[in-house]
Amino acid sequence: MVTDKAEDRQTGTAPAGPPVTGGPARWLLPALTLLLPVLLAWTAWAQIGERWTGIAGGLALLAVLAWAARTVPADPWTTAAARAGLAVVLGWAGLAKALEPPALQELAVEAYQLLPGALITPVGVGLPILEIVLAVLLLAGFATRVGGVLSGLLMAVFIAGIASAWARGLKIDCGCFGGGGQIADPPYLSEIVRDLGFLALAAWITVWPPGRAALDRRLGLYED
């Protein structure tokens, strides 16, 4: 109303409105949301700066998503970037494991000393398949919320497994991007913080699906 506007001018306040979506956040946030997980996957696979890259990258990813939640919540481009970034992570991890000999896949699972012997082979062989399937679903934007939930649960399992190994004094390669077995000085904190960043991506996708270029949009399953 006119009276309300006059009161706003007199008190120096402005009516509440939607969050600002212009400026650098409009393009920078999706770019960072895609770039950071890809860099984290590459450095983990190549074992570059293992003790600090996961911490720096994971915290940066959490900060970017917190910034996005405050400035451009439900932005479909940020969700699309989160889908693509997490798909790269899961696809890279899955392919790295799948291309290794089955014995090494089993060794990576067995090293955690959590599962009975009968489950080591099914988990060692099945985990890379699950990761690749989730990567395809996220990249295509099909069943986006389901893919986000399953990816988040998977990341939570990874974090719990790494934390458990750390608490029990085991010294093992997490096997996240291939490899596995005993190592001298595992970078557990870096791996946990990195996976927390990936978990945040999955949470974003779950809360604000499906994003741009998603099959769910074409099929009319979601609107954004």
Image (tube, rainbow, N blue to C red):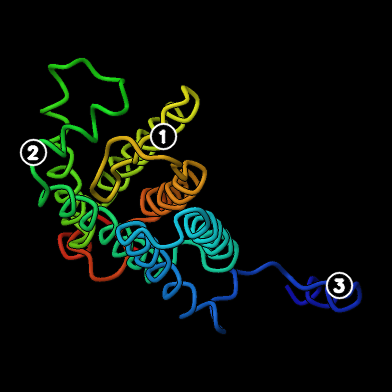
Helix or strand or loop: what does disc 2 sit on? helix
Q: Amino acid at mark 1?
A: Ile
Left or right: where does residue 89 sit relative to residue 102? right
Looking at the image, residue 178 lies above or below residue 123? below
The residue wearing badge 1 is 162
Please give left or right for residue 177 compared with residue 171 in the image. left
Q: Residue 54: image x %, image y %? A: 47, 55
Q: Quadrant of residue 101?
A: top left
Quarter holding the C terminus is: bottom left
Q: In the image, residue 194 lies at what x, y percent?
A: 45, 51
Q: Residues within 10 Å of mark 1 (few under 14, many from 20)?
A: many
The structure residue drawn at horizontal position 10% and vertical position 52%, both measured from the top left corner, is 99
Mark nearest the camera among 1 and 3 is 1
Residue behind mark 2: 102
In the figure, is residue 69 to the left or right of 178? right
Depth check: 174 or 184 in front?
Answer: 184
Choose the circle earlier in sequence order: 1 or 3. 3
Residue 109: horizontal and vertical position, in percent? Answer: 24, 31
On the rendered image, what quadrant is the N terminus found in? bottom right
For marks 2 and 1, give the CA distance: 21 Å
Relative to 173, residue 87 above or below: below
Give the farthest residue toward the right. 10
- Residue in the picture at 35% in, 33% down: 157
Circle 2 Cα neighbour tier, 10 Å, few/some/many (<14 / 14–19 / ≥20): few
Q: Secondary structure at mark 3?
A: helix
Badge 1 element: helix
Q: Which residue is mark 3?
A: 7
